[in-house]
Amino acid sequence: MFDIFSLVKTKDLLGLKELTADDINEILELSAEMKQLLLSGHKKSSRMAGKNVAHAFYEPSTRTAVSFDEAAKILGAVSCGMSVANSAAANKGENLMDTAKVLSAMKFDVIVIRHQSAGAPHFIAKHVKSSIVNAGDGRNEHPTQALLDMLTIKEKFGTLKGLKVAIVGDVKNSRVARSNIYGLSKMGAEIRIACPDTLLFSGSEDMEKNYSVKFFTNAEDAVRDADVVMALRLQLERMSGGLIPSIAEYHALYGVDERLMSFAKKGALVMHPGPVNRGIELATSVMDSERSLIDEQVTSGVAVRMAVLTLLTGCKEVRS
Ligand code: CP
């Protein structure tokens, strides 16, 4: 019987680096079940009745914030968003830890947090009773994004094992890339990363030693024979400048368009975590094509977040 508490030896979901392939498999299996509920005409369950979830987003979000809220509500939990702009932290000098303790003292079962500092969720998880879910911490990890990516790929191909997944773009700033390297590698996929040297993170050599990942500067080499090509958002807000010569040159070399896709396997599928800089990292002709899984990723996101909330609150066996 799966129990996320015993398997990951923690009450929290902080990253995929800490999870095993068995943990990931079990989350994906429950996510597939949740997706059926989401796609059914009756999007309602009492599985999490009596539980409550707080959402603290210190960085902007559409997909992650709304889907965690939707997930909690579909499952019958009380779902409360904290307005960071109006918070005591933003306006009265309260620190992150003290804000987290306030939410924990309000007896929230789960606190979902997105924060600009890598490690912020890990830090507060050690000090509060509530379960902490990392909804993106700086450049570190975005575990539920990688889980929803894996669910989407698995549903299309039936497996993750043996697939070639090319990830193209701003890897340096991407928590999505890191979580996908950990997750996909543990699930038996082969990851090829394409980015300019200036957008590569430090530690890539260790990554190649420890995970099934290879780094390329030439996007065509990375995409060759890929089953899936995932474009990453160019995170202009995290760049201090000068990392790429120009947007036009970046698009010519690393933009996922029909030309670049011609190096992938016939029928290869395209993904993007969103939000997309349309026409920069992804050409409109590809983004709006039949091979794009972007909408499917968003739907999978709700299902994965339903599964994660269910597991962390011990509601897996509750039927409705
Ligand atoms: N993919 C993702 O995290 O999107 P949001 O920033 O809209 O949550």
Image (spheres, helix red, strand yellow):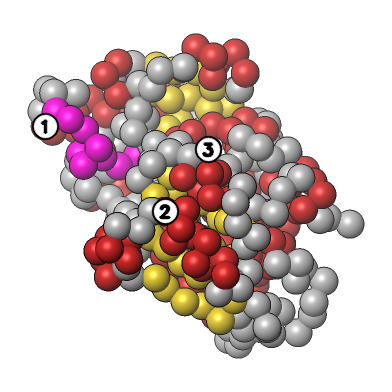
Confirm whether residue 289 shows in the render.
no
Q: Quadrant of residue 44?
A: bottom right
Note whether 7 is above or below 298 in the view shown.
Answer: above
Mark 3: few/some/many CA within 10 Å (<14, 14-19, 20+)? many
- Let me know if residue 3 appears in the view: yes
Residue 246 image-quadrant placement: top left
User: Does residue 286 appear to the left or right of 207 in the view shown?
Assistant: left
User: Residue 240, relative to residue 306: is it above or below?
Assistant: above
In depth, the one of 53 and 99 nearer the eye is 99
Which residue: 39% across, 70% down?
A: 82
How far across and how far down the image is residue 128, in percent? 60, 57
Whether residue 171 is in magenta: the answer is: no
Q: In this figure, which residue is indicated by the disc labeled 3?
A: 180
Q: Is residue 272 left or right of residue 54?
A: left
Which amino acid, by three-letter code, is at mark 2? Leu
Q: Residue at x 38, y 41 (%)?
A: 117
Amino acid type, mark 1: Ala
The residue drawn where x is 27% and y is 63% is 92
Residues at circles 2 and 3 in contact by the CB criterion of under 8 Å:
no
> What is the quadrant of the N terminus in the image?
bottom right
Horizontally, is 274 left or right of 37 in the view? Answer: left
Residue under numbered circle 1: 248
Q: Quadrant of residue 84?
A: bottom left
Residue position for label 2: 96
Closer to viewer: mark 3 or mark 1? 3
Give residue 186's mark.
none
Q: Which amino acid type is marked by label 3? A: Asn
Q: Which residues are magenta?
A: 231-241
Relative to residue 3, is residue 237 depicted above or below?
above
**What residue is shown at x 72% (from left), y 57% (from top)?**
29
First-in-chain label (2 vs 1): 2
User: Which of the two discs, 3 and 1, labels the residue nearer the N terminus?
Assistant: 3
